[in-house]
Image (cartoon, rainbow, N blue to C red):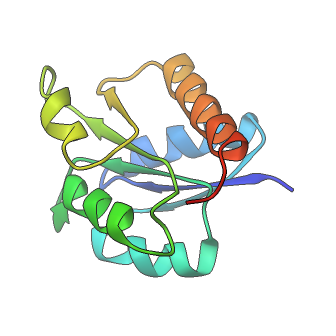
Amino acid sequence: MLKRILVLDDNQDILDIVNETLTYEQFEVQGTTKGNTVIPLMEEFTPDLVILDYRVADTNGGEICRKIKTHPKFNNIPVIIFSAYVNRDNELFAYGCDAVINKPFDLTELVEKVQRLILLKTTLPER
C-alpha cells in the first residue's frame, strides 16, 4: 500500500510540482489550496505525512500544524512546513513541525525529508 501525503499550498504550481515529484516516488498525494480543508481531509484521506505551506491565503500553516500535533487522532503524523521566510526555522519548529523546507526548495531535499520522516514514523511505536 502506498504511503499517503497531504499537501497544503495556495500556489497551484507548487502543488502540481510536489504532487508529480512524490507520485513519481511512489507516494499517494492529495493536495489542497485551502487551509480550512486540512483537518477534514485528514479524516477521509488518513495521510502518513502532511506538508503545509506556512503562509496561505486563508490561514497560517503553523497554526494548522499546532492543531494536528494536539489532535488525539493525528498527533503522531509527521508535519513538514514549507516557508519562504528563511532564517525563521526556530519559530516554525515552535508550532511542533517535524521538519522545515525553505522555499524555493530542492526536490531532492523534499523527497529525502519525506522518506526519512515516513521511515521514522513506521519504526517508532505509536504514542
Quadrant the C terminus occupies = bottom right
- Taking the image as shown, residue 69 lies to the left or right of residue 28, namely left
- Residue 107 appears at what percent x and percent y? 52, 23
Any part of residue 60 in sight: yes
Tell me which residue sits at (22%, 53%) in the image. 62
- Residue 80 appears at what percent x and percent y? 40, 42
Q: Quadrant of residue 106?
A: top left
- Residue 124 appears at what percent x and percent y? 65, 44
Q: Quadrant of residue 68?
A: bottom left
Which residue extends farthest right? Answer: 1
Instruction: Give the vertical position of 86 relative to 1 (above or below).
Output: above
- Taking the image as shown, residue 103 lies to the left or right of residue 17, namely left
Quadrant the N terminus occupies = bottom right
How many tags in the picture?
Answer: 0
- Taking the image as shown, residue 80 lies to the left or right of residue 126, namely left
Any part of residue 33 in sight: no
Seen from the viewer's position, the closer of residues 16 and 105 is 105
Seen from the viewer's position, the closer of residues 91 and 84 is 91
Tell me which residue sits at (35%, 51%) in the image. 52
Instruction: Give the vertical position of 37 relative to 61 (above or below).
Output: below
Tell me which residue sits at (58%, 46%) in the image. 19
Tell me which residue sits at (26%, 60%) in the image. 66
Instruction: Give the vertical position of 31 relative to 36 (above or below).
Output: above
